[in-house]
Image: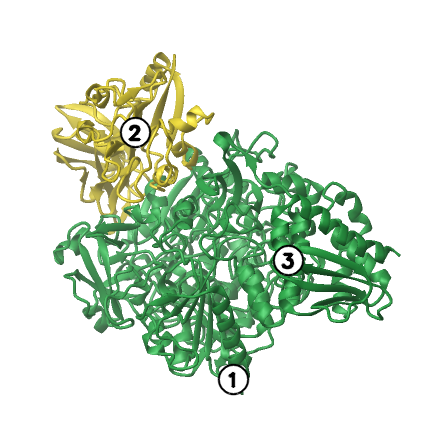
């Protein structure tokens, strides 16, 4: 009975809604079809015929429907329909919800008791009509002055308000909280109370988003390469050179789907390589770890393995001494802000520039805390070849260092501590193993060479008295060590040939100081805010809608909380991202996995091709350009022109870098043109509690602020359209629109306890109240270890079996203690990574004499300050006008490279002269910035330019896009890792006179 | 009558460019009739950042100075504008986008270079203090909202109150010699337009050189101590806020355990970074 009533209600609802909604009427008129909803045995049912936009519906079973929605029993059908329809009743929904079983439709579908059969285009249209009815009355955005609407969105550089008028973005601003938003935390330190401002900060690349949305480099229409004929000559050798012709979405999607089918038919699933960027425009539905994974799993693909390119030294090095593999070898991020401000007397920034790299996604949230530290008189030291933005602003002692030699300085500091008796002997005795061997090495008992301040001087360029003072100050003062932008590692010196040595040396130094004792920890006030760590909202790597319980953190919470179907890629073949060119050009490649579950996981070497698998024949490229982040980038150009790759599809927002190497371009829209949901800076499984970089947890309903520009579509819509052509649309979309997936995410989280969906949808954000009770705040990182207690910080790693003694007792290492000589490396024979962290000079640097003579300058390429990797750069954005980012010379925006006046004078280079940075790998034209902030003999240029613009033949001519990774070595940090080492790079610099030849 | 002012703290600006970016975001592609015509996508810098390095490797310092329309009370553009440039009661100076059409002469008249020529619209343009937003209820301009360090601060106070704030915080106009009475006031401008003397004090003892902290460094001019600082743990010292062309001076370095040293210096146009100064142990008494 209820089933029949529900079916009748659906017909009534469609009629009533269509009277009031011209948009629904238009949607209903798009396609004529007949839908049958019925019980499997045919005992009950109703059909719905749409013809010319008019609805006809009758009880009964029709003979030839276009689609059939079939339930095993009427009772099941009734319950599923009640569930699906209940969302329409906005006000009643909170009351109805306890009586609904959110798992019911999914469980019924999994058991084939609830099926959708028939024509894909008709079923998709039917769900679109149904979803429109469900959601059309949902209101989004707040009215603002002057007839504008204030929407909310989220970027890699912070959450933003988006003011829209007449369908166009007027401005994008940081979030300013209102009276009802939770107030910030406060901490009492040294007689002062500190509370962060009641607002959210934003990075320049986030605030420049409007110029990126309306960029002249937007891809607005599907395009096909002019000389690509899928049925004839494909001309792969012309990729990167020939132009494009606009085609219709129908043609583009049909071509993409038919190529996916053809490649799988002719070569097998493993012949498709999914290549994607490590980051994406923000949002838990549209992120690359969500909808894209779901789709790519559904079609099968060879997996591109991302190396931990911002954490290399920590993952491949430091983790062996103290674990934390699930944090890529970086320390616990808890409680440091309060502890540092209360206790610390000095912060040593070592290859650390938080004001530039913003702890990844946190914009300038840590800035105010560093101002507090300065006000409290906490001393600052900065060890960096470049006097970076943080050093220049905060002040303190700048110690310039020869790139790649940091481990030598660290050993010398340890040497002073040992010879002067300045280390924490009690801690070393109780909490560590293997110290005696390290001690013997440092004192020269092993090799006759004491690793003294005098020993390190020729390597590092640092005078012995500076090292002695640093060591003594460090010992006399409770000191925080800030490694990389985040303070607990990340970026900088760990991305070099000696990166693992450096990160290993850093944790060894801290073990000698008593890591975890009050005021002695990793950090620079970027992480460890006293926020509510228990309030649940999924981060971007927590699975989203992917259903991937293997490659995302879906299984941890999301899979139990959010009803969705599982997805799985069955292809085992994989390629290390940095070896894609070799895989294609040589047909062979090796790699080591970024397996974070255990310390030993990274040792499991894999080879391409996998046994019995096809080589790569098709590349599905998704998101930004890889040129800017691939060492020896010219390799990639040559690989993409290979005739062994029959088809390259590129689904991107902008025309940049790699798009010009595609056969087919599918234009995606930005996050401002689609609906999504997310939490600021929350990466979930890729960094548990990553949001504690922030002063306030901000969860955002990312409004669709404007309609997609041109013919661009959201990634989700593109995948849905492709799914339709592959018979997968019901599986892929589960009948939901992006907005409905957002509501599922909302419902799966702790948000409904705090704010209604209606209000959240309209206002667009929610500020999670901070932890006010000190007992509930996360304790300071590793305090438990220092005090010999069970682990008491709220992180679920390491996994239970990783403990050697009792669960939560000790570290992840075999001994449970800090291991100066790691058990894992003792068993793994890697001559470049010996168990004892001996100093091995960089394989490319001042010590490599023959090469150094040819290319006498060291190039360092840190993470960029004004763009987020390739995001925000190029693309005609206003970021280009920042003179420290790019400089406009003769009508072209050139990447900047910093050169010391001494080196500049030798080469006749003046400020903002165009110069060619070159070595035997290629040449890049940059605008010279002549500055005393860079150490003589060193050139500084940010990595990850979005542009790759060879003047002549791609792969073998001068680039003027600023793609400096053309010059960096493809060599791994050590052969038995997949670690990149771009900061070990020798170049020469000369004035550029317009030549195209390298 | 309360009027708008902007305070720029040079010590707090770390060159993030959020002010520059938000100014572009606000004005590029947006027409605010009665206030401003659209800013071109590239080329214009209504809010710009001056950069200056003082000293030399490795004792180099970088200062950043955001500059923009100063909304002067005695503005040359208002005087020359013949009605094309308006001084509002709240202190804000607006170039009328209709009446100023074709007035390229106004570009050169601003002594701060804050007026930009829009070739396409044939219009002089400058930062309006975001007057259109202020008039719609905003309590600060966008550059202030987006500034992460508090280097930019806007305040609407009476001229009397502002004079007190200027005096109390040692605020200065960007260029002292212009008599335009700007409403943008700079704090810690010495980091940009004054000189420093920096050095390192070392101690030699039993053949080992070490940094010497707690040394007293006195700057002496015409036999008078004009400034005194102490060296830090690394032996480093810096005497700042010195005027260009101060001429010949003397540095005296004192430490109870070491023999005093004197170094002669001459201050011209550039900051000075001295060679390390080693002190010798005094003979035991």
Residue A223 percent coordinates (x, y): 41, 66
Q: Colour of chain A?
A: green
What numbered label is drawn on residue A267? 1
The answer to whether the residue labelled 1 contacts the one labelled 3, judged by CB atoms less than 8 Å apart, is no
In the image shown, does A397 or A786 lie closer to the viewer? Answer: A397
Going 79% across and 52% down the picture, which residue do you hit? Answer: A9
Q: Residues within 10 Å of mark 1 (few under 14, many from 20)?
A: some
Circle 1 — which element? Answer: helix
Q: Is residue B204 visible?
A: yes
Marks 1 and 2 sit apart, C-alpha to C-alpha, by: 65 Å
Vertical placement of A214 versus A774: above or below?
below
Residue A407 percent coordinates (x, y): 37, 61
Residue A31 percent coordinates (x, y): 62, 61
What numbered label is drawn on residue A52? 3
Q: In the rendered image, which quarter is residue A566 located in? A: bottom right
In the image shown, does A963 or A285 lie closer to the viewer? Answer: A285
Q: In the rendered image, which quarter is residue B195 located in? A: top left
Chain identifier for the yellow-coloured part of the image: B
Judged by depth in the image, the label closer to the viewer, 1 or 3, is 3
Q: Residues within 10 Å of mark 2 (few under 14, many from 20)?
A: many
What numbered label is drawn on residue B97? 2
């Amino acid at each position: 009975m209820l089933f029949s009533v529900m079916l009748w209600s659906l017909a009534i609802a469609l009629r009533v809604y269509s009277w009031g909604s011209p948009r629904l009427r238009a949607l209903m008129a798009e396609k004529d079809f007949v839908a049958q909803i019925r019980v499997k045995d045919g005992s009950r049912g109703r059909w719905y015929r749409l013809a010319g936009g008019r609805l006809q519906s009758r009880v009964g079973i029709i003979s030839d429907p276009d689609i059939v929605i079939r339930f095993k029993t009427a009772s099941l059908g009734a319950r599923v329909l009640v569930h699906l329809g209940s969302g329409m009743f906005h006000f009643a929904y909170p009351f109805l919800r306890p009586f609904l079983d959110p798992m019911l439709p999914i469980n019924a579908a999994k058991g084939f008791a609830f099926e959708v059969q028939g024509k894909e285009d008709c079923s998709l249209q039917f769900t679109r009509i149904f979803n429109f009815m469900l959601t059309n009355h949902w209101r989004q955005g707040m009215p603002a002055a002057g007839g504008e609407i204030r929407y909310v969105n989220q970027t890699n550089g912070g959450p933003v308000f988006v003011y829209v008028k007449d369908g166009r973005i007027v401005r994008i601003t940081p979030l300013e909280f209102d009276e009802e938003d939770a107030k910030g935390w406060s901490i009492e330190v040294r007689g002062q109370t500190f509370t962060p401002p009641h607002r959210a900060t934003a990075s320049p690349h986030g605030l420049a988003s409007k110029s990126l949305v309306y960029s002249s480099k937007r891809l607005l229409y599907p395009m096909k390469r002019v000389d690509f004929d899928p049925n004839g000559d494909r001309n792969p050798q012309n990729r990167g050179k020939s132009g494009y012709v606009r085609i219709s979405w129908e043609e583009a999607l049909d071509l993409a789907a038919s190529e996916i089918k053809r490649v799988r038919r002719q070569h097998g699933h493993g012949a498709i390589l999914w290549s994607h960027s490590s980051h994406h425009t923000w949002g838990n539905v549209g992120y690359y770890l969500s909808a894209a994974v779901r789709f790519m799993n559904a079609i099968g693909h060879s997996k591109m393995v991302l190396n931990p390119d911002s954490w290399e030294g920590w993952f491949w090095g430091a983790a062996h001494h103290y674990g934390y593999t699930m944090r890529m070898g970086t320390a616990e991020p808890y409680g440091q802000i309060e502890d540092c401000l209360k206790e610390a007397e000095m912060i040593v920034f070592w290859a650390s520039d938080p004001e530039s790299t913003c702890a990844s996604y946190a914009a300038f949230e840590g800035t105010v805390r560093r101002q507090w530290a300065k006000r409290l008189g906490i001393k600052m030291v900065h060890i960096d070849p470049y006097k970076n933005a943080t050093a220049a602003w905060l002040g303190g002692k700048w110690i310039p260092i020869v790139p790649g030699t940091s481990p030598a300085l660290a050993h010398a500091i340890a040497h002073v501590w040992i010879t002067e008796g300045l280390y924490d002997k009690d801690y070393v005795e109780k909490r560590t193993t293997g110290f005696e061997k390290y001690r013997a090495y440092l004192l020269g008992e092993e090799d006759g060479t004491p690793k003294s301040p005098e020993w390190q001087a020729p390597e590092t360029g640092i005078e012995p008295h500076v090292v002695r003072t640093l060591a003594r100050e460090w010992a006399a003062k409770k000191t925080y060590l800030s490694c990389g932008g985040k303070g607990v590692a990340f970026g900088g010196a760990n991305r070099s040939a000696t990166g693992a040595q450096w990160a290993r040396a850093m944790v060894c130094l801290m073990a000698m100081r008593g890591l975890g004792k009050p005021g002695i920890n990793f950090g620079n006030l970027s992480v460890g805010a006293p926020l509510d760590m228990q309030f649940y909202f999924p981060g971007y790597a927590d699975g989203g809608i992917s259903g991937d319980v293997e490659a995302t953190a879906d299984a941890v919470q999301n899979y139990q909380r959010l009803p969705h179907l599982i997805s799985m890629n069955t292809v085992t073949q994989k390629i290390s991202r940095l070896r894609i060119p070799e895989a294609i050009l040589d047909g062979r490649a090796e790699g080591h996995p970024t397996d974070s579950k255990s310390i030993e996981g990274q040792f499991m070497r894999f080879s391409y091709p996998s046994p019995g698998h096809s080589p790569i024949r098709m590349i599905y490229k998704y998101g930004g350009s890889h040129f800017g982040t691939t060492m020896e980038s010219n390799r990639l150009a040559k690989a993409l022109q290979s005739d062994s790759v029959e088809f390259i599809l590129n689904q991107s927002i902008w025309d940049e870098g790699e798009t010009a190497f595609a056969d087919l371009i599918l234009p995606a829209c930005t996050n401002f043109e689609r609906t999504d949901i997310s939490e600021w800076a929350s990466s979930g499984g890729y960094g548990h509690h990553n949001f504690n970089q922030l002063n306030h947890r901000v969860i955002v309903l990312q409004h669709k602020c404007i309609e997609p520009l041109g013919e661009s579509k959201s990634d989700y819509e593109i995948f849905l359209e492709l799914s339709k052509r592959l018979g997968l649309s019901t599986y892929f979309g589960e009948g939901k629109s992006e907005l409905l997936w957002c509501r599922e995410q909302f419902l799966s989280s702790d948000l409904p306890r705090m704010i209604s969906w209606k209000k959240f949808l309209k206002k667009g954000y929610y500020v999670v109240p901070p932890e006010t009770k000190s007992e509930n705040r996360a304790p300071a990182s590793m305090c438990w270890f220092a005090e010999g207690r069970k682990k008491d910080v709220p992180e679920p790693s390491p996994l239970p079996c990783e403990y050697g003694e009792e669960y939560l007792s000790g570290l992840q290492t075999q001994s449970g203690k800090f291991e100066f000589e790691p058990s894992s490396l003792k068993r793994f024979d890697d001559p470049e990574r010996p168990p004892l962290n001996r100093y091995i000079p960089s394989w490319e640097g001042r010590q490599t004499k023959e090469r150094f003579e040819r290319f006498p300058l060291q190039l360092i390429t840190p993470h960029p300050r004004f763009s987020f990797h390739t995001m925000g750069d190029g693309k005609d954005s206003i970021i280009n006008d920042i003179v420290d980012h790019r400089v406009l010379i003769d009508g072209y925006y050139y990447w900047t490279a910093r050169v010391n006046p001494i080196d500049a004078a030798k080469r006749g280079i003046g400020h903002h002269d165009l110069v060619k940075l070159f070595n035997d790998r290629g040449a890049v034209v940059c605008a010279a910035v002549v500055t005393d902030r860079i150490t003589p003999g060193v050139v500084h240029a940010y990595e990850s330019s979005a542009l790759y613009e060879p003047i002549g033949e791609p792969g073998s001519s001068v680039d003027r896009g600023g793609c400096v990774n053309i010059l960096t070595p493809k060599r791994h940090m050590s052969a038995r890792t997949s670690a990149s080492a771009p900061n070990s790079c020798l170049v020469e610099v000369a004035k550029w006179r317009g030549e195209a030849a390298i | 009558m309360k009027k708008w002012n902007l305070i720029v703290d040079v010590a707090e600006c770390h060159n993030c460019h959020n002010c520059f970016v938000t100014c572009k975001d606000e004005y590029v592609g947006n027409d605010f009739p009665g206030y401003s015509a659209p800013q071109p996508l590239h080329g214009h810098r209504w809010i710009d950042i001056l950069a200056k390095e003082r000293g030399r490797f490795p004792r180099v310092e970088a200062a950043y100075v955001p500059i923009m329309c100063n909304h002067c009370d005695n503005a040359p553009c208002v005087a020359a504008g013949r009605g094309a440039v308006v001084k509002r009661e709240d202190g804000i100076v607006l170039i009328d986008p209709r009446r100023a059409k074709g007035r390229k002469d106004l570009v050169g008249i601003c002594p701060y270079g804050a007026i930009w020529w829009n070739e396409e619209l044939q219009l002089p343009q400058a930062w309006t203090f975001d007057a259109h937003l202020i008039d719609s209820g905003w309590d600060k301009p966008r550059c202030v909202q987006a500034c992460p360090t508090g280097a930019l601060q806007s305040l609407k106070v009476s001229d009397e109150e502002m004079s007190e704030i200027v005096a109390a915080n040692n605020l200065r106009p960007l260029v002292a010699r212009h008599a335009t009475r700007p409403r943008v006031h700079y704090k810690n401008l010495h980091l940009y337009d004054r000189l420093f003397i920096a050095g390192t004090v070392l101690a030699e003892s039993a053949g080992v050189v070490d940094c010497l902290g707690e040394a007293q460094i006195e700057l002496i001019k015409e036999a008078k101590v004009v400034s005194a600082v102490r060296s830090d743990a690394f032996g480093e010292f810096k005497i700042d806020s010195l005027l260009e062309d101060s001429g010949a001076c003397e540095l005296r370095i004192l430490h109870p355990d070491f023999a005093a040293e004197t170094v002669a210096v001459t201050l011209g146009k550039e900051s000075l970074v001295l060679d390390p100064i080693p002190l010798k142990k005094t003979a035991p008494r």
